[in-house]
Image (spheres, rainbow, N blue to C red):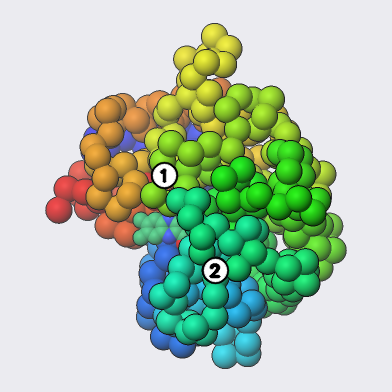
Amino acid sequence: MTSAPTRLGGLLEPAQLSSMSLRNRFAMAPMTRGKSPGGVPNAENAEYYRARAAGGVGLIITEGTYVDDPAAGKSESVPRFHGEDSAAGWRTVVEGVHAEGAAIIPQLWHVGAERGDDATLNEGLPARSPSGLALSGSAMGEAMTTAQIDHVIGAFADAAALAKSIGFDGIELHGAHGYLLDEFLWERTNRRDDGYGGSRADRTAMPAELVRAVRAAVGPDFPIVYRYSQWKSGNFSATLADNPGELEHVLTPLVDAGVDVFHVSTRRHWLPGFPDAADGHPVKGLAGWTKELTGRPVITVGAVGVETVFVSKGPAPEVPIDERLDILREQYERGEFDVVALGRALLADAEWVAKMASGRADSITVFGTR
Ligand SMILES: Cc1cc2nc3c(=O)[nH]c(=O)nc-3n(C[C@H](O)[C@H](O)[C@H](O)COP(=O)(O)O)c2cc1C
């Protein structure tokens, strides 16, 4: 990559995400590791996050962490977000990141039908999802009862309150990629007829109720970030909304319920969110549309500083790496987003931001080249 701090322009300037003050506009994207045996963040985990904070990002979004529901996850080695042992582990993570000058929020997670039928965590317990359907549309586990929905909503609210008490700077709700909250939003996986399913507006009822419960648990000033995506695990052409009007119907109830910031998970930040609705704009990514439709600050993401498109080592992007950085800066200058998240770039090189900012781009280890 070519070295030039100017290539990043205003992205190195401080940002305000709701009540969170960030030293720059780079965040670490949430990335599951499976390196917390027993679900408890340990010293290695704390050092991993501390190193990324020391490497210059303004905000760290942790890997997905399970809320307190027996069917929330599938693996024993993914950190959980309940219990005193795990809270103590997270406290150490937070202290390490804060000492390096970055903010940190946990990504609260329930995997829904993606628990599958081979989970090792609480083995034998069926997956729970809106309609007992996997992302493929085939039967998987159980459709949730309203009591189970209430329990999950309470678990997210409790986790958010715990995050606040531990010293996190906010929380992110994992509403993307075909996990539980996204399964409520998506037509294919939500076939309920009890007010939690039906029209696009009905399908937002559970996620919106959950956001309201979280807001009630944390009070007015604690930032709630909501991550959503069009794509689902194993289905990159899936959509929740095929035009801006449909997207507005999905997002407005979440705004009304109390979401402060949207984290728009795309695999290529430079593609138009709705190619048929370009509005004369050179590019308006899904993040740009989200910002315009909700009036909320937005985090964008998707193949910044890497040589492949997600999944881990997917196809090479159509646009060269330096050109993509220029497009990113232009999108920022046009007001399409507030913060950009880096995923795999920070797996390959914890100091990506510091090196870019100080003209040492040539020394960056680029993900996808080794
Ligand atoms: C190893 C790995 C684990 C991931 N785990 C999560 C996760 O727990 N939660 C989530 O929302 N996204 C997860 N993602 C997606 C990333 O947050 C990000 O959106 C994706 O990697 C694209 O960004 P990038 O091109 O900068 O890597 C994961 C990605 C990777 C590579």
Picture layout, residue 159 above or below residue 113: below
Residue shown at 66% from the left, 49% from the top: 191
Return the residue nearer the eye: 331 or 301: 301
Is residue 260 found left or right of 354 in the rendered image? Answer: right
Q: CA distance from mark 2 to mark 1?
A: 20 Å
**x, y percent for residue 151:** 74, 73
The residue shown at (17%, 48%) is 369
What amino acid is found at the position of numbered circle 1 in the picture?
Asn
- Kind of residue indicated by mark 2: Gly
Disc number for residue 235: 1
x and y percent of residue 361 in the render? 26, 44
Tell me which residue sits at (53%, 36%) in the image.
239
Closer-to-camera residue (249/226) = 249
Pick the front one: 256 or 281: 256
Residue contact at pointers 2 and 1, CB within 8 angstroms: no
Residue in the foreground of this view, choosing between 168 and 138: 138
In the picture, measured across the screen, residue 268 lies left or right of residue 159, that is left
Q: Is mark 2 within 8 Å of ligand 1?
A: no
Q: Which residue is mark 2?
A: 141
Q: Quadrant of ligand 1?
A: bottom left
Nearer the observer: mark 2 or 1; the answer is 2
* Left or right, residue 11 beside residue 191: left
Question: Where on the picture, by quarter, is residue 264?
Answer: top right
- Helix, strand or loop at disc 1? loop
Up/down of 162 relative to 42, above or below: above
Q: Is residue 116 above or below residue 220?
A: below
* Residue at the image position 20 percent from the left and 44 percent from the top: 362
Residue furthest front in the image: 139
